[in-house]
Image (cartoon, grey):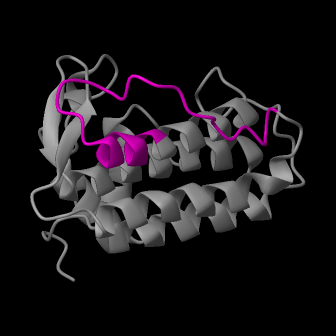
Amino acid sequence: MPTDAPFTHEDLDIVTACVADAWRAGAGEDWSAPAGTLEWSCARTADHALDAVLAVAFFLAAGRQDGYPAWEWTTPTPCQGGRPDLAGDAMATVGRVLSAVIATAPPGAAAVIWRRPLPEVRLAADFAARGGLEMILHGHDVCAGLGVPFAPPGDVCARLREHSRGWPHWRSPGWHEAAASDDPWADLLAASGRRPH
C-alpha cells in the first residue's frame, strides 16, 4: 500500500500487533518506571492507552454527533492492578475491538472523534488514525520506560503521519505538525515532543 494512502484499520491491526508484542516482551520489567519522557509510570501510561483506544471504539460505535457517549464504561487496568503481564493481551484485545467497529461501520457512519478544542464529527475511516496515534505514541512511551525495543513499520508510520496531518492535536502545547522526512516514525515522535529510544 502506498505511503500516501489513508491509514486504515488494517494498518491499525499492524500497530496493535507491534505494541502488544513489545509489551509482552517487557512484561517482566519494572512497570513503575517513568514512561519515556512522561511523568506517568509505564503502568499508568499503558492503562491510559488501553482506555484511549477503547474509548475511540465506543465513540464510533455510539455514533453520537453532539458529544461523547453520556454513559460510563469499564476500562481495563491490568497494569495498575498489578498484572503488567496482561498488558500485551489487553492491547491486542482493545485494538481488535476498534478495528472491528471500524470495519463493520455502515457507509457514511460518523461520530464525534474529539471534543477539544471543539467537538468534531468525522467519518469512520478517521477513527483508525485516532486510535493508532494513541496506541503508537503511548506504546513508545511504555517501551522507552521499560527499555524494550519498539520500531513500527515505516510505511505504516508514513500513512499515520499523513492521515493525521492538520488535526488539532498537533497544535497542542509541546506538539507541532509532523515534518515529512524519509523517517516518518522519527517525524511522529518529534512532532509529539518525544525522542527515539
Q: How many marks?
A: 0
Q: Main secondary structure of the magenta part?
A: loop
Is residue 54 shown left or right of residue 105?
Answer: right
Q: Quadrant of residue 105?
A: bottom left
Where 81 sits versus 54, above or below?
above
Outermost residue, bottom direction?
Answer: 1
Q: Nearer the viewer, residue 26 or 85?
A: 85
Residue at point 46%, 25% (across, down):
71
Whether residue 14 is visible = yes
Magenta region: 55-80
Say whether residue 195 is visible.
Answer: no
Q: Position of residue 74 (x, y in %)?
A: 63, 35
61 relative position to 73: left or right: left
> For residue 14, which quarter of the picture?
bottom left
Percent across and percent down for residue 158 are 26, 63
x and y, in percent, of residue 85 in the image: 84, 55
- Residue occupying the point 66% across, 50% down: 143
Q: Position of residue 107 (x, y in %)?
A: 12, 64
Q: Is residue 70 magenta?
A: yes
Q: Quadrant of the N terminus?
A: bottom left
Asked if residue 37 is among those painted magenta in the image, a careful observer would answer no
Q: Residue at x 80, y 55 (%)?
A: 86
Horizontal side of residue 129 vs 46, given as left or right: left
In the foreground, 134 or 192? 134
Height in image: 8 above or below 80? below
Of 71 and 75, which appears nearest the observer? 71
**Picture residue at 70% right of the left edge, 59% below the top:** 88
| Horizontal side of residue 24 vs 144, given as left or right | right
